[in-house]
Image (cartoon, helix red, strand yellow):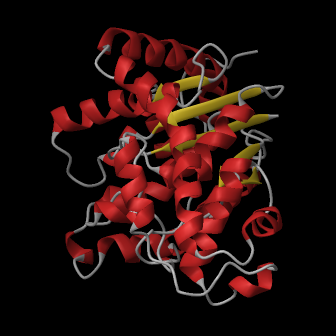
């Protein structure tokens, strides 16, 4: 088993990132086989980023991942740009992927908005780079949320077509892995929208760097409804904000929704919110302390990323050699 997953370095991590992905990553690093986790800085430049800020974001996010429990001695942690084989394989796959496949990708329509003609080619074609990110390592499994299932299907289609076109069994069609303990953590201000670092309201999310007081204030002001907490999950139907807070508590406790309802049924959210805030603080406070100690240590962070990149390049080179040889290119020598 080999798993690959990435995250864009676009600012502070929040509780949605932690519960939706990082908790699972930390568990996966102890599984048999290789676990590769990368900071997707090549994906970040599909839209303009101020260069110094991008470099700072990569280091800050690396510090946050390590503070959250990701161990560079166990997992293979790196940023894409240190492994040029990602871009090299992406070009080979561009020549196999079909324009019709990309035209069906819904995220380009969402991200480009009304300025589609002014969007970069990278923003249009980045799903092929995503395919390269996983096919480069013959990943057997990829953790995905609901919004990435379409992109994994594209990676599978590209793998199958490449193998068929060149009569070679080079690429594995990866399988999806269910995301972390809470697949979709929703906004604290709008239960119909995902928690996001791009939301203009900082009150909509819990950042991993928030102080204990800030966490308590955000939970206290989180939108709910006047109804009491029900005894059965069906009682949360149509109550998106209430369900979100209950599910956050369950995810942090490692239990199911019913167990939380058994504990708090009949109480109002005025009583539940302090308990939830305390549970979030207990989880995030140690992470914040470790992050603050590491975030300005550029030498340690860069050394961890370079160590991971060296290991990633060792795994990537045989795939590049096999792909270029199959296509008739004078690329690197095939690796036995």
> Quarter-wise, where is residue 328 in the image?
top right
Q: Quick check: 109 above or below 180?
A: below
Write the residue at 39% across / 68% down: 221
Front residue of 47/143: it is 143
The percent coordinates of residue 197 (x first, y second) are 36, 57
Write the residue at 60% across / 50% down: 19
The percent coordinates of residue 157 (x first, y second) are 69, 61
Write the residue at 61% across / 26% down: 316
Front residue of 292/301: it is 292
The percent coordinates of residue 261 (x first, y second) are 76, 70
Front residue of 96/304: it is 304
The percent coordinates of residue 231 (x first, y second) are 80, 78
Q: Is residue 214 visible?
A: yes
Q: Quick check: 320 above or below 282?
A: above
> Count the marks: how many?
0
In the picture, measured across the screen, residue 165 lies left or right of residue 239, that is right
| Position of the N terminus by quadrant | top right
| Position of the C terminus by quadrant | top right
> Quarter-wise, where is residue 53 in the image?
top left
> Quarter-wise, where is residue 319 in the image?
top right
In the picture, measured across the screen, residue 290 lies left or right of residue 273, that is left
Q: Is residue 162 visible?
A: no
In the picture, measured across the screen, residue 98 lies left or right of residue 3, that is left
Q: Quick check: 145 above or below 318?
A: below
């Amino acid at each position: 088993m080999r798993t690959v997953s990435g995250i864009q370095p676009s600012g502070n991590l929040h509780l949605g990132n932690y519960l939706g992905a990082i908790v699972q990553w930390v568990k996966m690093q102890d599984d048999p086989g290789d676990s590769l986790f990368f900071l997707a800085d090549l994906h970040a430049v599909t839209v303009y980023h101020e260069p110094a800020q991008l470099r700072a974001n990569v280091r800050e996010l690396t510090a946050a991942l390590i503070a959250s429990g990701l161990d560079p001695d166990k997992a293979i942690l790196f940023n894409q740009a240190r492994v040029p084989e990602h871009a090299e394989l992406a070009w080979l796959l561009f020549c196999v992927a079909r324009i019709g496949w990309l035209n069906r990708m819904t995220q380009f329509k969402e991200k480009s908005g009304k300025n589609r003609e002014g969007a970069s080619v990278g923003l249009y074609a980045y799903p092929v780079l995503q395919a390269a990110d996983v096919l480069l390592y013959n990943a057997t499994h990829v953790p995905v949320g609901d919004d990435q299932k379409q992109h994994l299907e594209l990676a599978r289609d590209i793998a199958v077509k490449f193998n068929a076109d060149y009569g070679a069994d080079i690429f594995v069609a990866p399988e999806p892995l269910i995301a972390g303990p809470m697949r979709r953590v929703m906004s604290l201000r709008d239960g119909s929208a995902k928690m996001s670092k791009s939301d203009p309201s900082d009150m909509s999310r819990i950042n991993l760097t928030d102080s204990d007081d800030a966490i308590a204030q955000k939970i206290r002001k989180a939108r709910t409804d006047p109804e009491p907490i029900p005894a059965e999950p069906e009682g949360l139907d149509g109550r998106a904000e209430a369900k979100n807070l209950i599910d956050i508590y369950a995810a942090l406790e490692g239990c199911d929704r019913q167990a939380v309802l058994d504990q708090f049924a009949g109480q109002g959210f005025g009583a539940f919110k302090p308990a939830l805030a305390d549970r979030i603080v207990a989880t995030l406070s140690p992470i914040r302390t470790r992050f603050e100690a590491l975030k300005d240590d550029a030498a340690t962070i860069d050394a961890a990323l370079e160590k991971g990149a060296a290991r990633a390049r060792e795994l990537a080179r045989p795939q590049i050699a096999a792909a270029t040889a199959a296509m008739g290119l004078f690329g690197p020598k095939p690796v036995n």
